[in-house]
Image: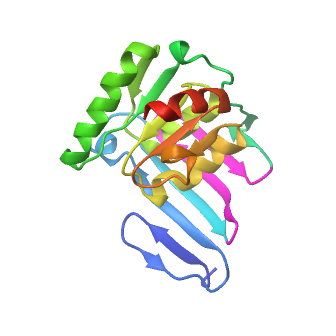
Amino acid sequence: RPDDGIVAEEGSARESKSGITWVIDPIDGTVNYLYGLPGWNISIAAKDKDGVVVGVVYAPTLNGLWSAIRSQGATYNGKKIKCNDPVPLDRALIATGFAYDLTLRIGQGQAMANLLPKIRDLRRNGAAAVDLCYVAMGAVDAYFEASLKEWDLAAGGLIATEAGAKISGKGGGTPDGELVLCAGPTLHAALLPLL
């Protein structure tokens, strides 16, 4: 498909002539990969003018393959998945990540300090796409992070929303580099004002 566009973490970029753009992260969770930790993955999505059409996240060390097609639901290793909803805030297991930008980590640390007394616990897995997929399958109840890029969010975001999760940025707007929050609708509403 030589007329398709490409957006990728590793610098490959090409404008779409076909209306389809591939959003690729060849190794999401690079630090996990470098240190031999599990969870790193390959994240691939295709989008059109209306958003992401299809998303696939494959994590070899977890033997996990998540996928979704717009308006057709989400699967994990071929089985339909759904996010947890409703989840009370005080029972929520929440995944997060930390920015490489040290100045952003100050705000992230403050968010953690604010959340910890209100929730069950926090997890730091090290790969955004898998964290989004964990929300999709109910392995965690929510995920939030700052400084994500399109390739971090495209495939896992579609998988999570097709599994019933809500994704937004600050104030409920479009997710962006400032905030991505993903959770079932009830928990999303409870967490949004706290971040």
Measuring from the top left, give residue 181's x and y in whole percent. Answer: 51, 40
For the residue pair 149 and 16, the one nearer the viewer reads as: 149
Magenta includes 162? Answer: no
Magenta includes 60? Answer: yes
For the residue pair 171 and 188, the one nearer the viewer reads as: 171
Query: Does 135 sit above or below residue 34?
Result: above
State the residue lying farthest toward the right: 72
User: Is residue 38 among what the camera can see?
Assistant: yes
For the residue pair 116 and 75, the one nearer the viewer reads as: 116
State the residue lying farthest toward the left: 102
Measuring from the top left, give residue 179's x and y in whole percent. Answer: 43, 46
Magenta part, dominant SS: strand
Query: Does 56 sit above or below residue 60?
Result: below
Task: Determine the image quadrant of residue 187.
Answer: top right
Q: Residue at 41% of width from left, 74% of height from top? A: 12
Image quarter where the C terminus lies is top left
Q: Which residues are magenta?
A: 49-71
Image quarter where the N terminus lies is bottom right
Q: Residue at 19% of width from left, 45% of height from top? A: 102
Measuring from the top left, give residue 62's x and y in whole percent. Answer: 50, 33
Task: Determine the image quadrant of residue 20.
Answer: bottom right
